[in-house]
Image: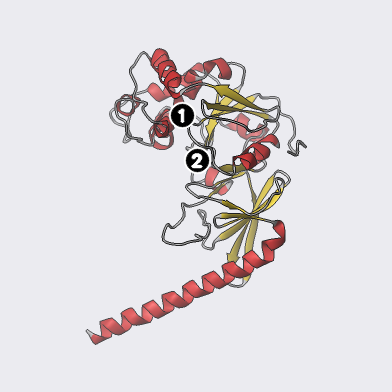
């Protein structure tokens, strides 16, 4: 593992917490390596699963069971909670500041993250300017950090019937995942006038939040918000760049803070840790960049041709009627 650091030091101490139960993604070694480049953040992996990965100095392993997390949350909130499956943890991410208070107490900012991420340079979104301007950075389910105050650790408990989303009291009594981390807690913080970055106007313009794949296609192109064309992403030495590909070639290039590969099963066709392409459902060698551009262009052209044929058929059907 390449242990070089590509990020500057910061005066704030920051931690990200990842509870995970079950089999880790097949590319989790790339999660670890890319996280190691963000040396100004400490990452905590919480699990009781088998874990054979070697960890750099800024990533820590804590062996804690799912049931112990449930007990901790009940003790901190003085309420019974439903937590029978790991997926339900999504609803309790805003409570991590209380659940893992023994970890969080050593930091100025704490937060959560997901395992299906390749980290780029996080100082694109976590820097002196953003920290001084906002108390909460992110706001999404895959990544968020919060200023370490007693108020922010407990604000998820706030209840007001005028708010449109579920409250914690509703969330804790059902086995279903109600997406409280992305909607309920976010609405609470907005209602309480907490200084927070906007998911759509701020976060999603700075990170690659890739749309889930089309299960009908063998290799589903990668699309992101605010971009009409599919993308190819390149990871190189702690940085992620995305290239939007139109029929005529590369339309736009931008660096992003991380890539969230939600619900994609990835085939790894490279052994490189510090340089690779993220293309559809594959990690490929950088040498295949031009081939990926060509294949993407052809795919777009075929889709255009298909759309034209379908449009003509629909038009003929209407005229025949």
Horizontal arrangement in the rendering, residue 143 relative to residue 67 (left or right)? right
| Residue 315, percent from left and from top | 32, 81
Using the image, tell me which numbered label, if any, was put on residue 93.
1
Horizontal arrangement in the rendering, residue 9 relative to residue 62 (left or right)? right
- 315 is higher (above) or lower (below) than 251: below
Q: Residue 268: tell me if it is visible.
A: yes
Q: Residues within 10 Å of mark 1 (few under 14, many from 20)?
A: many
- Identify the residue at horizontal 61%, vertical 58% (top origin): 232
| Residue 213, percent from left and from top | 46, 55
- Identify the residue at horizontal 62%, vertical 43% (top origin): 257
| Numbered disc total | 2
Q: Quadrant of the C terminus?
A: bottom left
Horizontal arrangement in the rendering, residue 116 relative to residue 311 (left or right)? right
| Residue 190, percent from left and from top | 43, 32
Q: Earlier in the sequence, mark 1 or mark 2?
A: 1
Mark 2 highlights which residue?
A: 198
Quadrant in the picture for residue 83 = top left
Quadrant in the picture for residue 173 = top left
Label 2 sits on a secondary structure element that is loop
- Identify the residue at horizontal 67%, vertical 30% (top origin): 55
- 279 is higher (above) or lower (below) than 88: below
Mark 1 touching mark 2, by CB under 8 A? no
Label 1 sits on a secondary structure element that is helix
Q: Residues within 10 Å of mark 2 (few under 14, many from 20)?
A: some
| Residue 34, percent from left and from top | 66, 40
């Amino acid at each position: 593992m390449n242990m070089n650091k590509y990020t500057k030091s910061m005066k704030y101490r920051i931690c990200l917490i990842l509870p995970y139960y079950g089999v880790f993604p097949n590319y989790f070694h790339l999660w670890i390596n890319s996280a190691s480049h963000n040396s100004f953040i400490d990452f905590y992996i919480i699990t009781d699963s088998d874990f054979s990965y070697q960890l750099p100095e800024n990533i820590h392993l804590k062996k804690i069971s799912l049931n112990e997390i449930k007990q901790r949350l009940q003790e901190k909130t003085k309420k019974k909670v439903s937590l029978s499956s790991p997926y339900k943890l999504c609803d309790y991410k805003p409570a991590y500041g209380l659940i893992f208070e023994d970890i969080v107490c050593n930091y100025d900012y704490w937060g959560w993250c997901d395992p299906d991420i390749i980290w780029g340079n996080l100082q694109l979104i976590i820097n002196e300017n953003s920290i001084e301007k906002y108390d909460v950075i992110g706001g999404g389910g895959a990544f968020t950090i919060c200023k370490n105050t007693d108020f922010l650790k407990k604000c998820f408990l706030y209840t007001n019937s005028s708010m449109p989303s579920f409250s914690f009291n509703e969330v804790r009594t059902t086995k279903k995942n109600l997406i409280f981390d992305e909607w309920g807690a976010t609405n609470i913080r907005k209602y309480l006038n907490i200084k927070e970055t906007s998911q759509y106007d701020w976060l999603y313009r700075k990170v690659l939040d890739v749309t889930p794949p089309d299960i009908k296609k063998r290799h589903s192109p990668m699309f992101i918000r605010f971009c009409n064309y599919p993308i190819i992403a390149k990871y190189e030495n702690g940085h992620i760049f995305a290239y939007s590909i139109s029929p005529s070639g590369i339309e736009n290039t931008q660096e992003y803070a991380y890539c969230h590969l939600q619900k994609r099963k990835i085939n790894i066709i490279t052994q490189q840790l510090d340089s690779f392409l993220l293309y559809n459902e594959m990690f490929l060698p950088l040498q295949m960049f031009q081939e990926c551009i060509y294949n993407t262009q052809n795919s777009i052209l075929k889709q255009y041709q298909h759309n034209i044929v379908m449009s003509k058929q629909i038009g003929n059907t209407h005229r025949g009627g």
